[in-house]
Image (tube, grey):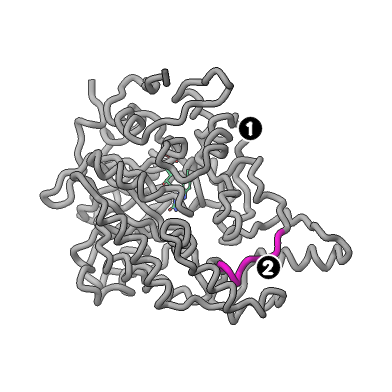
Amino acid sequence: MTCVDDFRLKFGKKEIVPIIVGGMGVDISTAQLALETARLGGIGHISDAMVPDVSDKRFNTTFVKDKTKFYRLNISNSDKSSVKFDLGLLAEATKLHVAATMEAKRGEGLVFVNCMEKLTMNAPRETLQVRMASALDAGIDGITLSAGLHLGSFSLIEDHPRFRDAKLGIIVSSVRALQIFLRKNAKLNRLPDYVVVEGPLAGGHLGFGADWAQYDLATICAEIIQYLKNEQLDIPVVAAGGIFTGSDATSFLENGVAAVQVATRFTVAEECGLPYKVKQEYFKASETDIEVNNISPTGYPMRMLKSSPAIGSGIRPGCESYGYLLDGNGNCSYITSYNREVAAHPNSKNISVMDKTCLCTHMSNMNCWTCGHYTYRLKDTTHRLADGSYQVLSAEHIFNDYLYSTDQKIALPKQPV
Ligand SMILES: Cc1cc2nc3c(=O)[nH]c(=O)nc-3n(C[C@H](O)[C@H](O)[C@H](O)COP(=O)(O)O)c2cc1C
């Protein structure tokens, strides 16, 4: 019976296991998870979201503390336009994270960085350019451009010596978005090396509006494959969002996609960056515990557990420490919502903000429990232990289950003795 291992993703002469573990910011897809995926022959992602914060936790650097100190006099000011990133320090943090990961890479697979373009960082072009160029400098195998696809991104690194050798991919959710991107980039004579088609069941931010439930990944993939064929463009298509079993993946591969990108199953891997307690929340979740809401200041809908501490939290905006969602004019919709609530409750110490969240602070503290639609099926992928907790899995076990499973079966891990 056909399984994922019968397929390979071809990049020129290189053949790769067609399983990509998607980027999960902020450091949910850790270097360990990406490295394990690459060791097993697939493609793993680290994420460059809030990379100075990630670097502080991984290497004991002090980027966040230093930035907070530098802008401390602005903390009570609601105008955040002066809070900027030092591009040299941003480059340093990116290089630390990427270089340490690439030095540790073993095996035939690849490690890419997920670059979330909606992190506008009060200087969208400049910061994105530095993030991409520094990742290339530090030897990353490829860059996947996600959330908020900036049509001019490729041109920001066209002078980089690795522009044509590193793999560059984009995430889209419609054939239209792909068409616009290709049209806009035609003059660069540099096609994406792969296109990830992310459907409405994915985790993180969604590339759909409130009508996300009306879309279907298989249909969008078929449209995109047909479009590329009509245009005689040979770009591998990667399907993402809701591919929960090896059989799901096989069926996409049989229908013409070159690889699948998965994430939710790996949120409960030992190598995943979520704290143990949060992994247990993911295991325990039922379908009704998950929602798609609009609290992300990016403006994109986001799927998360309803019990996420980020929902309804009214903490002071953390822009002096973080500030990743400040647009080019220093605004973030959470600041507006926060100021509105403060004005409405002048005597309250603790306010609640329901419509938006301070995503930077909550992602840093692992308090925004973003997840894929099928998170409620995670409990079926493992054992429930005597104390009522669920057994966390190894990334290798999950990877191999995708690779070899057939008939919608999910292999359970060996029970601890
Ligand atoms: C916890 C979590 C965090 C995510 N964060 C990001 C992110 O930062 N950037 C991104 O492009 N995609 C993100 N995603 C989407 C995944 O990379 C992936 O494309 C998608 O979730 C695959 O669908 P699946 O989770 O149903 O397997 C995230 C997904 C999850 C589950």
Quarter assignment of residue 178? bottom left
Question: Residue 149: x percent and y percent?
Answer: 42, 62
Type of amino acid at the residue the image marks with label 1:
Thr
* Residue lying at the far left of the rendered structure: 13
Residue, disc 1: 288
Residue 201 vertical position relative to residue 350 in the rendered view, above or below = above
12, 367: nearer the viewer: 367
State the CA–CA distance, disc 1 to disc 2. Answer: 30 Å
Disc 1 crowd rating (10 Å Cα; few below 14, some 14-19, many 20+) is: few
- The quarter of the image holding the N terminus is top left
In the displayed structure, would residue 344 be above or below residue 34?
below
The circle on residue 54 is none
Query: From which residue to which does the magenta span run?
Result: 315-322
- Three-letter code, disc 2: Ile
Q: Which residue is drawn at 27% across and 69% down?
A: 137
Closer mark to the observer between disc 1 and disc 2: 2
Q: Does the magenta stretch include residue 110?
A: no
Q: Estimate the x, y position of residue 64 in percent, counting from the top left.
A: 53, 67
Q: Is mark 1 on a helix, strand or loop?
A: helix
x and y percentages locating residue 192 in the rendered image: 27, 59
In percent of the image, x 67 and y 74: which residue is there?
A: 75
According to the picture, the residue beneath numbered tag 2 turns out to be 335
Q: In this view, does 56 lie above or below 289?
A: below
User: Which residue is located at x 21 percent, y 55 percent?
Assistant: 233
Q: In this view, does 161 lie to the left or right of 22?
A: left
